[in-house]
Image (tube, rainbow, N blue to C red):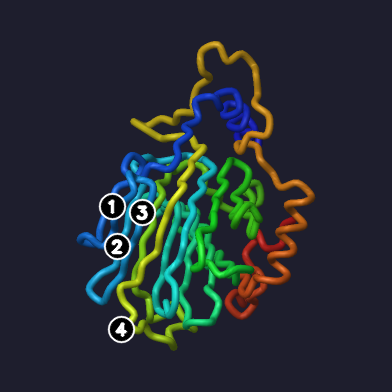
Amino acid sequence: MASTTLLLVTLFVSASLVALSSANFNQDFQITWGDGRAKIVNNGELLTLSLDKASGSGFQSQNEYLFGKIDMQLKLVAGNSAGTVTAYYLSSKGSTWDEIDFEFLGNLSGDPYTLHTNVFSQGKGNREQQFHLWFDPTADFHTYSILWNPTRIIFSVDGTPIREFKNWESNGVPFPKSQPMRIYSSLWNADDWATRGGLVKTDWTKAPFTASYRNFKAEACVWSSGGSSCSSPPSGSGNAIPKNSWLSQEMDSASQERLKWVQKNYMIYNYCTDTKRFPQGLPTECSLP
């Protein structure tokens, strides 16, 4: 873990170079597909994605990041959203890509949404955890956050942690730490698997389906021209190490208790307990603290 420790020290010292951006979709994102179904409105304060029978839509961030704390407020498709998926995630490119996923699997009216999470490293995923939420995610905006630093990934909803994936490279578990990632989001039809394993199909009479986004915020190291904005200490920084930085953030005891509460009451699937799926033995990280 010596290399990770050195990386942490370097990032700490250079933290004043960290990019802080918020809440202007015209500046921070570009619409990538959908033929007009994605829209940025209200002077860049609101972005909407829509799905109909012909196509869904999507967008991506202008910047690539190598570590960061990413917040986005989403309001999901209301009513009968069965068969639809709203994906919001970080991802690199290539055959051995890294990825950190939020996916919201649509529902029949009155049933809960399924929040699907996953972590890919070096092209390997299969680390799914799924949750129901303790509120209606279609009634209002809620904040979905990814904290990604050299020692852990923490998924949070409205500031409540729901999942932590630690850096266990010392135990042979790959961890996303070297490939810069963009933010992506899309709204698309996945009625072959999204709702009850594909048993419930999309009702196109309810289309168009729309999801809304606002209040994006990134405290992150921006990757550009082969280097990171956090790669070298700024002039005059001295040895000052900022306190409470996301670069070193861990979960305190209160956060750990909230995480346990969510996982006890709202987790509906955990790959680390799926012995049928892994008959040769659960993944290594499942037995680590």
Q: How many numbered marks, from 0 up? A: 4
Marks 1/3 in contact by CB < 8 Å: the verdict is no
Q: What residue type is labelled 4?
A: Thr
Left/right of residue 13 with respect to residue 42 in the rendered view: right
CB of mark 2 within 8 Å of CB of mark 1? yes
Q: Distance between the residues labelled 4 and 2?
A: 18 Å
Q: Which of marks 4 and 1 is in front?
A: 4
Q: Earlier in the sequence, mark 4 or mark 1?
A: 1
Amino acid carrying label 2: it is: Ser
> Residue type at mark 3?
Leu
Residue shown at 71% from the left, 59% from the top: 259
Of marks 3 and 2, which one's residue comes earlier in the chain?
A: 3
Q: Between 168 and 280, which is closer to the camera in this rendering?
A: 168
Name the residue beneath numbered marker 4. Answer: 205
Estimate how packed mark 4 is, as few (under 14), some (14 to 19) or many (20 or more) residues with alpha carbons within 10 Å.
Answer: few
| Above or below 147: residue 274 | below
